[in-house]
Amino acid sequence: MKLNTYLNFNGRCAEAFKFYEKTLGGTIGMIMTHGESPARDFVSADWHDKIMHVQLDVGDQILMGSDAPPEHYKAPQGMVVSLTVAAPAEAERLFNALAEGGKVTMPFQKTFWSAGFGMAVDRFGIPWMVNSEQAA
């Protein structure tokens, strides 16, 4: 079994995933618009260029997403995407990139469980936790 994160956006999925691809160092392996899908008739024509499904491969992990039509979109609530990396400097780089243009909810800092930890909501409305492993 694998558990994967699936993010919904209000029309900015393509922009968000290009940013995540660059920031996280992954590769977009699959992307399909609503207009390219067999379900194209279930969304308005002005929504055909929005993303029905995208998959970003980051190492052996997968991040997926789509644009939810306005009548189905709800802002993320009650969840956070968590990233853990070994090096505190890399964690801080990721945190700063994700926080840019968004909102810091906990500044990146040393904690009792981590050499560096921070929380932010990115400019696309997705909440993130960035954690570096504690040195042994």
Image (cartoon, rainbow, N blue to C red):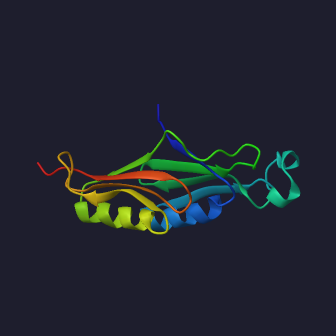
Specify whether 81 is left or right of 50: left
Where in the figure is residue 3, as x and y percent of width and height? 48, 36
At x 52%, y 66%, the residue is 19
**Above or below for 21 versus 118:** below
At x 49%, y 39%, the residue is 78
User: How many callouts does the rendering have?
Assistant: 0
Specify whether 52 is left or right of 2: right
The answer to which image quadrant residue 12 occupies is bottom right
Where in the figure is residue 92, as x and y percent of width and height? 30, 64
Specify whether 121 is left or right of 30: left
Query: Residue 100 versus residue 135: which sits nearer the camera?
Result: 100
Where in the figure is residue 96, as x and y percent of width and height? 37, 67
Query: Residue 3 versus residue 107: which sits nearer the camera?
Result: 107
Where in the figure is residue 52, as x and y percent of width and height? 71, 51
Q: Residue furthest top?
A: 1
